[in-house]
Structure formats: C-alpha cells, structure tokens
C-alpha cells in the first residue's frame, strides 16, 4: 500500500522542522506577543500606543527571489532570512509604519531539517535587527515542484501606524537634500542579471571573480533606525527603499517625488560596492541598465529639508550608520525623474 512518505512527503520531517522553527522564533517575541493554545499571537491592545486615536494596519509581502539559487548551490543558507526580513520591514518603515509581526513560508522539494533550521536562524537574526516578533510560519514539502536542493522563501509583515502620519514624499520640495543609507551589495534584487553574468555553478567552483560570500552578503536592515530618525526629525519627507527598479525611472526614488520634481544624485558622493563593478565589467552592461536594476550602494534614500540635513546625517552616524548626502531635489526640466550626474 502506497503511503504519503512513499510519494516523497514526510509528516515527521515537517513536524520536526516546525517545532525547531517555533523554538527559535520565541527569541524574537515582544511584550505584546502571547501564547494562545500554544500559538504565538499579537495582543493588539498591548501593541497599540495608548495615545493613538486611529491606528491603521498595513501589510507587506516579499521574497528573496533567485538569490536563493546561489544559497542552495553554495550551501550557504543562513543569510537569506535577513534578506527576507529586510524586504518586508524596510518597505513598511519607509512610509513611517512600525512593523508589528512577521511570518514566513518555506517550501522545498525535500525537507532537510538542518538547512531549514539555518534559514530560520537568518529570519530570527533579521527580526531581532528590525525589532519585530516572528510569530507564524508554514513549511511545505513538495517533491517534484522545486529543483533538487532549491527552496522558496516568502515573508509577510503586518505593520501599524497612526492615521495621518504616513510619509510618502508628499511634502518634498525643490532644494531638499537627499540623504542615503549604504548598501554593501545587491540586497535581494537583480539576481537574474547577476546569474547571467556569474552562473552559480561557476561561483561555487571558484571560477568566477565573485565568491559565494560576496554574492550572498545579506541586505542591510534599517527599520529601527529609520523609525527613530522619523520620530526625531519631522522634515524627513519619506524614504525610498531601493529594491526592484533600482535607481531608475521605475524605481522607488522616482515614485517618491511629487510631480514636477526630480532627484539629482552626485555619483562621486558615495562608493559603489565592488560586486557591481565586476558585474558591469564582465557582463559589458551599460550604466543605464546597472542603475535601473541595482541599488548601486544606496539602500535607503530620503529627501530632507535643507536646514536639517546635516543633523540627520550626524544622527545616523551616532547609531553607527555611515549616512551621506548624495544629492538634492530639483525642479524637473525634462522627462527624467532621477539624474545621475
């Protein structure tokens, strides 16, 4: 008689992976997380600040994308969880939304308990940096759906904010200064292009100018620091989290700027990480494609009122983050919303 395990699905492996995940998740729980029938849940009465009059909930969802192919091939999976958290929590913080709870989906061809435990370790690490509890998850073993040791990773984040406090660039003015927080690499975007230049099997074999560690460097998480800065400086207009679309015309920086304004970025004001230079040189890729695909070393960018710009930079420096002034907001003269000069 054929069993579920004969078909490639082990309930025992799935249960063991889930139990290990819950054990690790508890390290992220905050005072407003309670256990109800053994399940971690958010107590909204405890989570909502008492002085808020109209709290609003917002949700974010994202994944790590094809960077996971490098993680599987390199057998270096303990960093992609941080990527997952960053993609979700920083996407909320850029609007001045405080992350409330995080959950994740893990799907695999075969549940390797050690691999998935390391993946959870990375998610927990990211949640600690973002100061958000990791409260729910799902693990699916789907033989034949994923290829070999490859796996899927998707994150979901609930956020909360007081009605009327969102910052999405609506107050940005010509003359505002652009402040950026650095990125050490591609984060979790543009990896299909990177793979076309540096195939994972060549990276693993040491036949590439980039290493597994370089390609899998985790995304910087700035959630906590951005929210602190927003609280102190009311003239931070909002943040562009430079992910899909890079610094191009379809990216988040362009979308942050009101009609009639553009961002002028001084290319000499920040250092481009070496991995981008290698991708561009080996792949013979134009500047236009590079800047419209990757963050090029700028993970978060905010327009700030001119008179407070230096104070904001110094604030981030006091938190150990080398923020920099990278340009200014100008009146738009042509069609371009983002100028790299």
Image: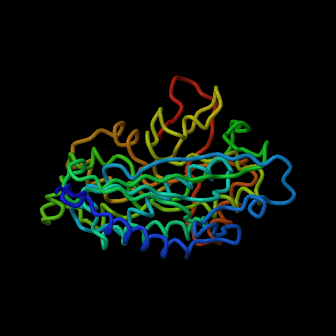
Please tell me which residue is depicted at 42% across the width and 74% down the height of the picture: 20
The image quarter containing residue 132 is bottom right
| Colour style of the rendered protein structure | rainbow
Q: Nearer the viewer, residue 92 or 314?
A: 92
Quadrant (top left, top right, bottom left, bottom right) of the N terminus: bottom left
- Count of picture labels: 0
Please tell me which residue is depicted at 55% across the width and 40% down the height of the picture: 253
The image quarter containing residue 31 is bottom right
Question: Residue 108 at what x, y percent from top left?
Answer: 29, 57
In the displayed structure image, the side of residue 279 where residue 87 appears, left or right: right
Q: Nearer the viewer, residue 76 or 207?
A: 76
In the displayed structure image, the side of residue 166 where residue 276 appears, left or right: left
Question: Residue 42 at what x, y percent from top left?
Answer: 66, 61
| Above-or-below relation of 269 to 80 | above
Question: Residue 329 at what x, y percent from top left?
Answer: 63, 39
Question: Residue 60 at what x, y percent from top left?
Answer: 56, 47
In the displayed structure image, the side of residue 117 where residue 308 appears, left or right: right
In the displayed structure image, the side of residue 160 where residue 3 appears, left or right: left
Q: Nearer the viewer, residue 67 or 135?
A: 135
Q: Farthest residue to the top: give it.
A: 334
| Above-or-below relation of 201 to 145 | below
Q: Farthest residue to the front: give it.
A: 1
Q: Nearer the viewer, residue 276 or 19?
A: 19
Please tell me which residue is depicted at 30% across the width and 38% down the height of the picture: 286
| Above-or-below relation of 114 to 212 | below
């Amino acid at each position: 008689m054929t069993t579920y395990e004969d078909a490639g699905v082990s309930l025992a492996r799935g249960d063991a992976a889930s139990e290990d995940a819950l054990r690790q998740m508890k390290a992220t729980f905050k005072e407003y997380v309670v256990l109800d029938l053994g399940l971690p849940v958010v107590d909204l009465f405890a989570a909502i600040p008492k002085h808020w009059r109209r709290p609003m909930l917002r949700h974010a969802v994202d994944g790590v994308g094809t960077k996971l192919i490098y993680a599987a091939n390199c057998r270096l999976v303990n960093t992609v969880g941080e990527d997952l958290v960053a993609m979700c929590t920083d996407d909320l913080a850029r609007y001045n939304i405080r992350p409330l709870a995080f959950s994740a989906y893990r799907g695999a061809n075969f549940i390797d308990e050690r691999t998935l435990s390391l993946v959870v370790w990375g998610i927990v690490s990211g949640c600690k940096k973002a100061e958000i509890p990791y409260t729910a998850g799902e693990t699916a073993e789907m033989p034949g759906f994923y290829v070999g040791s490859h796996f899927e990773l998707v994150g979901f984040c609930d956020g909360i904010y007081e009605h009327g406090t969102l910052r999405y660039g609506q107050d940005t003015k010509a003359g505002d200064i652009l402040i950026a927080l650095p990125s050490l690499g591609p984060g979790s975007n543009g990896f299909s292009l990177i793979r076309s230049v540096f195939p994972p099997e060549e990276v693993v074999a040491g036949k590439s100018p980039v290493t597994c560690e370089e390609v899998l460097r985790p995304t910087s998480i700035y959630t906590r620091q951005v929210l602190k800065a927003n609280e102190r400086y009311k003239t931070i207009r909002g943040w562009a989290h430079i992910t899909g679309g890079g610094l191009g015309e379809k990216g988040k920086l362009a979308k942050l700027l009101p009609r009639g304004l553009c961002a002028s970025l001084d290319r000499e004001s920040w250092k481009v990480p070496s991995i981008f230079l290698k991708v561009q040189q080996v792949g013979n890729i134009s500047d236009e494609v590079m800047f419209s695909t990757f963050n090029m070393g700028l993970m978060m960018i905010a327009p700030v009122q001119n008179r407070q710009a230096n104070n904001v930079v110094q604030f981030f420096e006091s938190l150990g983050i080398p923020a920099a002034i990278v340009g200014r907001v100008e009146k738009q003269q042509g069609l371009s919303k983002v100028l790299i000069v």
